[in-house]
Amino acid sequence: MGDLTRNFSNSEFSCKCGCGFDDISLELVAVLQAIRDITGPLKINSGCRCEAYNKSIGGKELSAHPDGDAADLHCIRSTMRFQIIDTALQLGVSRIGVYKNFIHLDVSDRLPEGVIW
């Protein structure tokens, strides 16, 4: 049981440095819940990041994580990768990063839209 949606809790999105930053976008969480309803359980690798933590792990300067508008989802299977991306696109997510072990999704309104990297 989650405190944000049926399956997601605020603690899953908290900054990993322990600073307490956990102001995740409810729009993003709703998208993630819809994806989870289709794909099954999702592990959040990273959600909110304070500026200092984002910099310390080599996060991009223009990252959506410090705004609470992004999440990285653990993903190593190609079928699940497809399901996540396909569902995210259907739900209007227009910023997607595809990496070897995770999928980045964000709903930033200050960064360019219509991008996949």
Image (tube, rainbow, N blue to C red):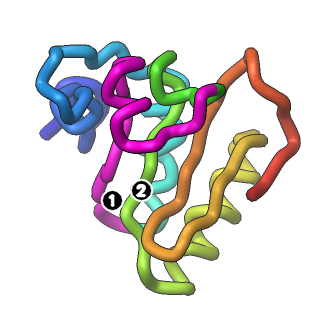
Residue 58 versus residue 10 in the image, above or below: below
Whether residues under marks 1 and 2 lie with C-beta atoms below 8 angstroms apart, the answer is yes
> Left of 56 or right of it: where is 68?
right
Residue 104 x/y as whole percent: 55, 51
How many discs appear? 2
Mark 1 burial class by Cα count in 10 Å: few <14, some 14-19, many 20+: some
Residue 78 x/y as whole percent: 55, 85
Q: Which of marks 1 and 2 is in front?
A: 2
> Left of 79 or right of it: where is 110?
right
Mark 2 burial class by Cα count in 10 Å: few <14, some 14-19, many 20+: many
Q: What residue type is labelled 2?
A: Leu
What numbered label is drawn on residue 29?
none
What residue sits right under mark 2 in the picture? 73
First along the sequence among labels 1 and 2 = 1
Q: Is residue 42 magenta?
A: yes
What residue sits right under mark 1 in the picture? 42
> Left of 28 or right of it: where is 5?
left
Residue 97 versus residue 92 in the image, above or below: below
Q: Does the magenta stretch include residue 102?
A: no
Residue at screen point 25% across, 43% down: 7
Q: What residue type is labelled 1?
A: Leu
Which quadrant would the N terminus be assigned to in this image? Answer: top left
Residue 61 versus residue 96 in the image, above or below: above
Residue at screen point 18% across, 29% down: 17
Residue at screen point 72% across, 42% down: 95
Residue found at the far bottom of this picture: 78
Residue at screen point 22% across, 38% down: 12
Q: Give the range drawn in magenta.
A: 40-61
Residue 4 x/y as whole percent: 28, 25
